[in-house]
Image (cartoon, helix red, strand yellow):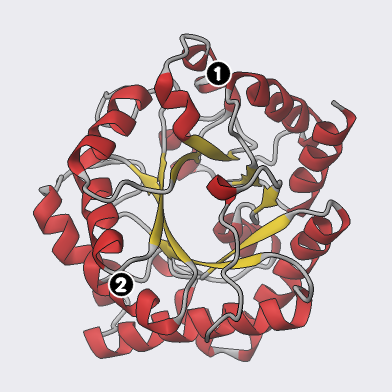
Amino acid sequence: MTHSKRQEMPHQTDQMFLTDAGFETSMLFHKGFDMPHFAFFPMLRTADGRAAMKEYFAPFMETARQNDAGFILDTNTWRANPDWATLLGYDADDLAAINREAVAFAGDLRTEFGAGMNVLINGVIGPRGDGYNPAEIMTAEQAEDYHGVQVGTFADSGADMVSALTMTNVPEAVGVARAAGDRGLACVISFTLETDGRLPTGQTLAEAIAGVDAACLKKPAYYMVNCVHPDHFGDLLELGGDWIHRIHGLRANASRMSHAELDECDVLDDGNPQELGQQYVSLTQLLPNLNVFGGCCGTDHRHVAQICDALHAA
């Protein structure tokens, strides 16, 4: 999958980019899929799964088109790493094949819905363990070995970039960034935060960003924040500092619940899309380089459309 012209990445332009929203929560609560271990990647090999993904992504890409925005098209691979795959009965060869198929499927979606748009295929890497609880933290070297396999598959399959979403700790993020740097792939690191605005390890976002940048010869292209409500970290941004210029993307939760509460939730908390849109506008005033907008748990196409409306009105 080659491109005649190198597409611009979000940190290389001031164009607005959209992402999708709470993919897994949408598939679970809106589409009713049974998802052991919160993993949707096995559904890539079913007609129902592919149809649901197509139906899910189409309106996001249409919203991007209407807003003259670029689109970051995620592969369905947040859980497609060895630990989770083993729990689901997949071996290493099968896992590599699934990651390749996910990139190819994203390519099909780009062809079908993204003509004439700047659509970047984004190889998604999730945490090795629980996205909310960094019970065991790898060293950066271990993380580079562990996640490097998936990064390599994405590089060989023609992904435009990779993003590590819902990262809970610095060494794991460093490992992904180094692996991507070795393969010449643009890399995005997205940290998740608790209700106190800190990483699950207790570090501040400023410390985490500085820590990853310092540990990488080839630094991540930019940083994001995902899976946290704007109320939980806005105050910390007001302190300012050079690090806030490294943040280009935000995928917030609709819900104000803590991660522990979300884990226990049987009903989807989809918050208030209009309110969330206004909160994104407030955050653009604190994050001067913010140009990637999407959602996380509990959000869907309605939230992203409201975010666009609010940003344009502002």
Q: Residues within 10 Å of mark 1 (few under 14, many from 20)?
A: some
Secondary element under disc 1, as helix, strand or loop, is helix
Give the residue type at disc 2: Gln
Q: Which residue is mark 2?
A: 150
Residue located at (32% from left, 82% from top): 95
Residue located at (36% from left, 48% from top): 220
Q: Position of residue 68 (x, y in %)?
A: 82, 54
From where the camera sits, is residue 237 visible?
yes
Q: Is residue 117 above or below residue 256?
A: below
Residue located at (36% from left, 71% from top): 80
Residue 20 located left or right of residue 154: right
Residue 218 located left or right of residue 34: left
Q: Is residue 202 above or below residue 221?
A: above
Quarter residue 207 falls in: top left
Give the residue type at disc 1: Gly
Q: Residues within 10 Å of mark 2 (few under 14, many from 20)?
A: many
Secondary element under disc 2, as helix, strand or loop, is helix
Q: Which residue is mark 1?
A: 234
Residue located at (55% from left, 60% from top): 24
CB of mark 2 within 8 Å of CB of mark 1?
Answer: no
**Residue at the far top in the pictured view:** 239
Numbered badge on residue 154: none
The residue lying toward the viewer, choosing from 279 and 156, is 156
Q: Count the labels in the image.
A: 2
From where the camera sits, is residue 197 visible?
no
